[in-house]
Each structure stands twice: as C-alpha cells, then as structure tokens.
Amino acid sequence: MNPCSIMPSWALVLAVLLPALAGAAGKDAAKVSAQELLGLIDKRMSFTSDYKGTVRMREIRKDGVERALEMLVYRRDKTKDLLFVLTQPRSMAGGGYLRVDMNLWEYNPLVGQWQRSTRRANIASTITCESDFDRSRLNEDYTAKDDGVESVDGTSYRKLLLTARPGVDITFPMLRIWVDPDNNIVKRIGYSPSGRVLRTDIIRSYQRLKDPSSGELVYHYKEVLEFEEEEGTKIVVHYDDVELAPLSPNIFTKAWLEGRNR
Amino acid sequence: MLALLRIALRNLFLQRERGLLLFTVIAGASAVLVGVMSLRTGVAAAQREAVTTFLSGDLNVGGFFKLHPDTISPVIGDARPVRALVEPLVPAGCHLRERGRGRVTAGAGRHRTRSYVVSLDAAKEGDSLRLFKVKEGALERLDEPRTVALSTQLAERLHVRVGDVATLFSRMVGGKQNAVDVRVVAITGRAGLLGESSGILVSNTTLRELSGYRAEAAGSLQLTCGAETDVDSLGDTLRQSLRKAGFELLPASHEAFGDKLEPLLREGWAGQRLDVSTWEDESSFLAFVTLGLAALSALVGIIVLAIVMVGLFVSLNVAVRERTREIGTLRALGMQRPSVVGMFVLEGLLLGLTASTTGACVASALCVLLRDALPLPEAISNLFFSGTLPLEPRPLEAVLAVLLITLGAGIASIIPAARAASLSPRSAMESL
C-alpha cells in the first residue's frame, strides 16, 4: 500500500492536533538514533500507575456490515498483567481475555470455560490484537533502522523500519512507522515475514494524561484507524474513560472475570 | 470353417462403405470404453498414492484414548509396548513409521479454517517425504520447533505464505482448548480433496505440544508396504497378536478415524482402545470418487455395447435382405443352415474383433501419450487427486473391452444370421 495515497486525509487531522502535543523532546528527535527513538516513544507512552480504560470499536467490513464492540481494559505494566472484559455487544458480554505470563487465555461465558489462545490471535474476532492495548514495547521487541523522511504539507515525518528481535513473540514481525517531530507515531504498517501487508494503522489522535504515580505527562492513543487492506475491513478504535489509578490485584485472576458473570 | 471365414472376409471387403462405417463406430466405442477404464484406474492409483502419502499407511495401528467418557483423543497413550509387539510382525519390504493425527483449526489474522492434521517425523521419514509434492519451502524444516506445512488450498484460504505465522487451535486430551503459533515452512501441492480435509502437516513434537500428549504417545504406527501386500490378512494377524497381548481392540470397521470419533465419544468407556485399519478404511470418505467412476465405466460399457449391437443388428439385417440371392445360391449348392448362421456370425465377430482391437490399441496409445500432459481445472483436479488427467491404461482392461465388444457383435449378429438361415433355397432362388 502506498502510504502517500492516504496522506492528505490524515495529514489535515495531524496538522490540527499534533502542534498541541509539541514538546522540547521533539526538537531533539532528529538527532537521536532510530533505536533511541523507539526508547523515547516507549517512555512517552508508559505508565507507572495501573490503567483502566474503555475501548470502543466500530468495525466496518467491505460489504458494508458494521459491528460495534466495547471492552474494558485493565493493565498493570509493573507486573505485565493485562485483562480485557467484553461489555458490548450483549451476545459477547462477560467474555474476556487474561494474560498470564506469556499465555493469553480467552474466557467464554456461555460455557464458563477458559481456552488458551496465543498473543498473536485476534481479539473478539476483530483485526485488533493484544499488543494494540498493551504498553508500548517497541524498543524491547524490535531493532530499528532509518527508512528515510517523508514530508507532508511541510511537516517531516521520520520513517523507521522495525524488525523483530529473535525469539520475540509479536504480531507483526516487521513494522514500518512514521514518527512526527514530537515523537508521536502517526502511522504504522505491520508486515508478515513474507513481506505481505497485514494491517495499516493511522493514529488519528493522542490524549495527554498525568501519571499520578510518577507525576509525569504521558501520552496515550485516543483514536486509531486500523485497516486491513486484503479484506477491506477497517476498524475505528476509541480509547475512552482512561483512569490511571491503583487497581485491585484480584482483577488479574480468572476467578475475578468468572465472578463478574455470576 | 476356413471357407466360411474366407466368405465372411470377402463379404466385409465387398461392402466397403458399410463395413468402414461399422468399423469406425465399433472402434470408437471400444476406444471410449478403454479411455474411461484408464481414467478410473488412474484416479484410483492417484487416490491411493495421495492417501498413503498424506493420511495413512497401507496398514495402521492407531488408538483412541478417553481420559473420561466425555472426551476422546485419537492417540495411543503409550506407544512403546505396541511398537515392541508390532515391529517383529512387520513383513520384509515394509516400513514402520509413526504418524500423529487429529483435528485442528488453523487461523491467521481473521481467517480460520478447520482441517485434519497429520504429524510426522521429518528426519526419520526420509524417502517418503519425497512423495509429497512440495510447491514452496522444504518439508525437512518441519523438524524445527513450532512449524507447519500447509496445503495450497489451506494456504490460500488463510492468506499465508512460507515464512508467515499461523495459529493452530486444538482440543487437548482433557478436553481443554489449546493454541500454538506455528511458522509456515512449506506449502504442499494439490493433493485432491485431501488438500482441503487433511491439509496440515506438523512434526510429531508440535502435535504433542498442541494436544498435550506425553513424549511416549503416538497417533498411529503405520506400515507402508506397497500395492502387492495383502493388508487384510496382515491386519488380521496384527489384531490377533494385539488381542493376545492383552490390548483392547475396536472391532474392524470400514471407516476413517475421524468418522469414528463422534460415535466413540458417545460410548461410556474410558481408557485406551487400539484400532487396526487399512488405507481403504482410512479413505472410506473418498470412496465415492472411485465408486462414481466405476459406475461411469459400467454405464459407458452398457451404452457402448448397445450402440455396437444395434448398429450391427441393423446393418446385418439389411445385408441379409440384400444378399438373399447369394444365400439362395449357397443353400442351393448345399450349404447347411448352421453354416449360413456361422457365416453371418463370423462376419459380425470379425468386424467386432478387428474394430475393437484397433480402437483399444489407439486409445491405449493415446492414454500413454496424454498421461500427465493434460492440465485439469481445479474442481476436477481435486476430485481426481491430480493436477493433470490421470490416465493409466492396463492391457487386461483393454482385452476386457475387446472381448466385451466382440461378444456383443457376435450376439447382435445371431438374429440376422438366423433369419438368413431360415430362408428356403427355393424362395431364395425365386428372388433371382
């Protein structure tokens, strides 16, 4: 997919939103190496507090069929805990996903059973996956190299080509990202090992939050457009009602999710 | 007799146009019959090759394990004692291999597809790996951990290529669902309907991890012997030996292991049961292809015979009417009625034999020339287990076609011959 073909639509959005996020760090972006830039991005998007948020997704298929989903995301980055609880649609409500160590478990409330899934598997039969809602781990998972600079409407975007480190279990073994002068990823394309485009994401907007634990400002996605070209499916993901506050450790257990359904 | 043969031959040459037309019709009919029979044989051979390559040995010792009555896994929990018992019984020239089997769902991105899985030990299989038609990648790489080879059909359905990652989902021994990410290392060529139904190949280690089997577990022990071996008697010997050794065996049934899962799940027992099956049992769900072609051959045979018989009957009837004078003369010269019948029947038999032999020879030669040369559309190639037209002419079948048509020609000429013989010399002479 030619990234230039979709530039004008999102460039306008970025031109309006991104100046607000501009900071001193951005001015040094061009000077840091590609790998250091990944570290900067990860740092800007990492919380020390626990995280709770509502993810609302609207999936539009090629044939025009639309589907809306809503799920709660609970995250504790310190212990790498992660839990998704599906709340909408009603037919899927009560189900969820729990990460335990390197395994992702899927809960089916209809039969009350947990099924082992993998971290690459899609969430709730959409084109999203676990890593979309987890903390940013670019520096840990990928080695980066510069892939040039692309200018759109006077703004230069640094392009990086990321290749997965050996032995790392990730959805996209290759990733190409576009980073704006403020170190925000504005676009990313995930590739399969054979070089096929798996998914294209446009990060339409970010939200700025204050991490109560560290007292620093952190950045989190607000609206992301994910697009699977092959199937012609696109999904708009909204990250709403984000709360950075301590969560009960009981949340990250199978019993807690099972208990919600009783 | 020799005189009758000479007269019949002369008559055939005298009526050149009619004779040539009949010759062409009979030769064409014979060629069609031989062609259909070659196709049936070719498809059966291609099916056997595909089945014994992908799915089954010529003879299999498999098993079903039920941890509790509500779950079932197609596995021998501890294959060591079974192997120790089977190995000494393997006839010379046969090989024993360990293959796993099961049912999984393969997924990549949003695409999911359900298929039977076959597991093998790539390092030990050696030569038999070459029987797989590999389109892309290398099957030897199945030895690497967490790898998979997919059939062309499944790879297309999942939209994956060599190097991509897919996920396999399967039910474990206890009934829980498990999933493993696997890297695609090879894409196998089209293997007929098996590409759709059994298009996933993994290593035995990967299947053990996915299904939660112990290291000493094995899906099945398969004997590969070749077409000459009497697998039924060998199967009986194995059954008796296993029973004598104290193993519980399922009764022999003409069903694939996948078709046995559901009925066995409904049974109330728990534990291990062994099952001895032949390649024909394991491919029973594909029998409709060979049965269909056999029915087609029979239908073509009937039509061909009808055409030959009706053609000859009409033609000889006309000949009798035209040759009344000749018959009268012959009768007046002292030819007896049986000799007249013999003359006409011999004419029909001669025509049938020469024409059908020519047709069979031409068809056999064409089948040899066109074998594996004519590409087939996808739907038909799936049904025929081959990307090209699988023709396998056999001399015995050609001889059978010739005999059948010659016999038909002989029968068709009896009534006109009897009519000719029934003419009195006087009435024959009167028509002069």
Image (tube, coloured by chain):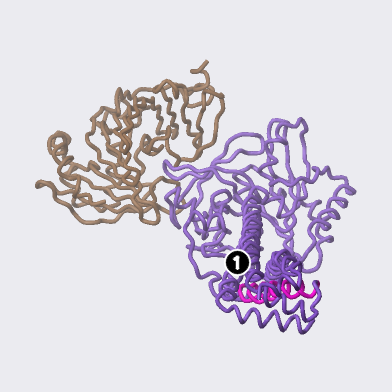
Chain colours: A brown, B purple
Of all residues shown, which one is farthest toward the front? Answer: B430
At label 1, counting other C-alpha atoms closer than 10 Å, the crowd grade (few under 14, some 14-19, many 20 or more) is many
Where residue B410 sits in the image (x, y, percent)?
Answer: 72, 68
In this picture, which residue range is highlighted in magenta? B338-359
Query: Can you say whether A6 is above or below B317 in the image?
Result: above
Q: Is residue B346 magenta?
A: yes
Where residue B406 sits in the image (x, y, percent)?
Answer: 70, 70
Q: Is residue B217 left or right of residue A196?
A: right
Q: Is residue A254 magenta?
A: no
Q: Is residue B129 visible?
A: no
The residue lying toward the viewer, choosing from B376 and A46, is B376
> What amino acid type should be assigned to the residue bearing mark 1?
Ala
The residue lying toward the viewer, choosing from B403 and A48, is B403
The residue singled out by tag 1 in the image is: B29
Q: Is residue A135 visible?
A: yes
Query: Can you say whether B432 is above or below B306 in the image?
Result: below
